[in-house]
Image (cartoon, rainbow, N blue to C red):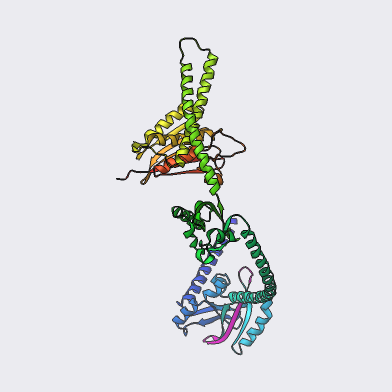
């Protein structure tokens, strides 16, 4: 019994599947124009609908058009639909053809549709209605209804245009018009307020300008402002009193005539670099006084930017440092003399200590030997300081001279690494040194630079004691670098680290020294026509490096 019922259900299922396939084939044949007639069964029996009078090209055109196109019989049944209509409602075509058109009409448009349908059989008409798609979402359409006289009787042709985009555009346009009207009212009110504000600000600006002018005219420095491109557009009274010139003579780039010829190129280079990068401008140069005398000045300029980062103008000062320069020269002279005077007794003292340490005739107490060793170590440090002072003195006098010859930088680095490993037992010093690193230079002076890098890395790496030394060559230069994982440098410290007597000031860490090692190293590298620099991140470590050019062939 169960088997018989199952068999019956399978037969009915197969019959339904065949009918569905036949219906789909029929719809596809109608859509593509492969048939000219079809029979539809209704309450009155079978009724023949023919398409034999329709031109195939016309049917293809209807099928391809963007608008929906359907044909209704007298009962409002959809006997034809193109794909565009079904696609607009998100229904498959077989769920449209054969169904009553009223099934798709949205509830709010039902009464209007009934009136429209009864009228359309009398004459052509148009109307806007909402149809529900497969998700019960109402979609606005413009319906154009026209009667068609077919062989099987009078039918209704309906062209449906989706108004969704148009309605949304109208909605947005209305919204924009409302917003525009509101903006006009706001603009009018703002304009009135702006006029009042401009009047007030103009008065404030005048007072502010006069205040600035009064302040700038009564300070001891020469003051100036310049446009973003570097052209000077203001000087204070101090400038005119000092130079004896007027604004027309020194505006824009006229100030160049006041700078000492030996200082002009360096001043221009740094000034143009600051304009290009937005970084603070600072340089020392000599300005010619009205009586023809030149005096040293320290120039500093900072940029004023808008909220979005655009340069508005530069504000600069020139401070007379002639007296400080003279005092510094006397200081350098004293350092040179004192260093020379100290070197001789230090050498003698070191010799005497060595004699005491090597004395063999009588037994020297162990404690005395310990004191002699400590004294010898202290004198060694003192000699290094004296040598640094002598180097600084020579640099200031332009007398830092040394011989140069062909040498392999790898030999310099290996010698420094060997010494460092011997001196600094507590640090892990490793290296990676390339080959054929030939340049023209002075072995002892380059060794001095590398050892200074290593000494600094050891000094400022109290926790992580890994130090890495590298020497390599590129297509343009030989580079030597020393990397540590120490306390690192801030951005401000990186800008000052190679200046004379500058020492890193860290409240959590202090180190001995006069702050001359890197200054001397930079001068040695400059004398080798090379460059020196540092890459560092605060609390992450530093890499000090120098680059030396290959010998000219």
Q: Is residue 436 left or right of residue 116?
A: left
Where is residue 307 shown, x and y percent of the image?
61, 60
**Number of dots carrying numbers:** 0
Which percent across, then down, holds residue 176? Answer: 64, 75
Is residue 311 something one can see in this rendering?
Answer: no
- Residue at far left of view: 553
Q: Quadrant of residue 220?
A: bottom right
Tell me the residue at 42%/34% (across/down). Answer: 447
Q: Nearer the viewer, residue 443 or 101?
A: 443
Res 452 visible: yes
In the visual, does 387 lie left or right of 174? left
Is 195 in the magenta?
Answer: no
Give the magenta part as a residue range.
133-153
Tell me where residue 68 appears, x and y as whole percent.
55, 77
Q: Residue furthest top?
A: 362
> For residue 440, what is the image quadrant?
top left
Q: Position of residue 130 (x, y in %)?
A: 64, 76
Picture residue at 57% right of the left edge, 78% below the top: 161
Looking at the magenta stretch, what is its main secondary structure? Answer: strand
The structure residue drawn at horizontal position 53% and vertical position 85%, both measured from the top left corner, is: 152
Question: Does the magenta run of residues contain 140?
Answer: yes
Q: Foreground residue, 189 or 365?
A: 365
Q: Is residue 484 above or below residue 221?
A: above
Residue situated in front as seen by the camera: 5 or 322: 322
Q: Quadrant of residue 367?
A: top right
The furthest residue to the bottom: 122
Who is closer to the viewer here, 93 or 468?
Answer: 468
């Amino acid at each position: 019994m169960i088997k018989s019922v199952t068999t019956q259900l399978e037969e009915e299922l197969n019959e339904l599947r065949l009918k569905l396939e036949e219906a789909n084939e029929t719809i596809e044949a109608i859509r593509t124009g492969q048939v000219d007639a079809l029979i539809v069964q209704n309450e009155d029996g079978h009724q023949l609908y023919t398409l034999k009078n329709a031109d195939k090209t016309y049917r293809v055109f209807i099928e391809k058009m963007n608008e929906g196109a359907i044909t209704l019989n007298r009962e409002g049944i959809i006997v034809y639909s193109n794909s565009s209509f079904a696609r607009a409602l998100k229904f498959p075509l077989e769920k449209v053809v054969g169904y009553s058109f009223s099934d798709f009409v949205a509830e709010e448009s039902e009464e209007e549709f009934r009136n429209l349908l009864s009228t359309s059989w009398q004459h052509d008409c148009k109307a806007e209605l909402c149809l529900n798609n497969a998700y019960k979402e109402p979609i606005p359409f413009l319906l154009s209804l026209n009667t068609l006289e077919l062989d099987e009787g009078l039918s209704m042709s309906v062209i449906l245009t989706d108004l969704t985009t148009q309605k949304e555009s109208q909605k947005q346009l209305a919204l924009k018009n409302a917003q525009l009207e509101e903006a006009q009212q706001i603009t009018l009110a703002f304009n009135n307020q702006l006029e009042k504000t401009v009047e007030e600000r103009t008065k404030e600006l005048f007072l502010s300008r006069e205040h600035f002018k009064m302040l700038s005219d009564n300070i001891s420095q020469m003051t100036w402002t310049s446009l973003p491109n570097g052209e000077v557009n203001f000087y204070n009274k101090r400038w005119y009193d000092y130079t004896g010139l007027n604004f027309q003579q020194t505006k824009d780039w006229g100030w160049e005539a006041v700078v000492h010829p030996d200082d002009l190129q360096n001043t221009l280079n740094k000034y143009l670099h600051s304009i290009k990068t937005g970084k603070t401008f600072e340089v020392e140069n000599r300005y010619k006084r009205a009586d023809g005398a030149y005096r040293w000045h320290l120039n500093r300029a900072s940029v004023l930017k808008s909220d979005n980062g655009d340069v508005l103008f530069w504000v600069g000062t020139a401070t007379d440092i002639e007296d400080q320069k003279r005092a510094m020269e006397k200081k350098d002279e004293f350092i040179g003399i004192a260093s020379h005077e100290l070197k001789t007794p230090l050498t003698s003292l070191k010799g005497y200590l060595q004699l005491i340490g090597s004395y063999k005739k009588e037994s020297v107490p162990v404690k005395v030997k310990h004191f002699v060793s400590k004294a010898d170590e202290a004198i060694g440090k003192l000699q290094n300081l004296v040598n640094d002072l002598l180097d600084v003195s020579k640099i200031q006098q332009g007398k830092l001279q040394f011989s140069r010859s062909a040498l392999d930088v790898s030999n310099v680095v290996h010698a420094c690494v060997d010494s460092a490993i011997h001196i600094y037992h507590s640090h892990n010093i490793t290296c990676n040194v390339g080959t054929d690193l030939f340049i023209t230079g002075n072995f002892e002076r380059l060794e001095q630079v590398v050892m200074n890098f290593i000494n600094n890395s050891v000094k400022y790496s109290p926790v992580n004691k890994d130090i890495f030394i590298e020497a390599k060559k590129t297509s343009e230069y030989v580079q030597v670098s020393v990397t540590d994982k120490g306390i690192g440098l801030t951005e401000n410290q990186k800008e000052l680290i190679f200046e004379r007597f500058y020492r890193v000031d860290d409240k959590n860490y202090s180190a001995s020294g006069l702050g001359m090692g890197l200054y001397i190293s930079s001068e040695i590298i400059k004398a080798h026509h090379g460059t020196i620099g540092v890459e560092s991140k605060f609390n992450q470590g530093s890499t000090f490096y120098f680059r030396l050019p290959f010998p000219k062939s």
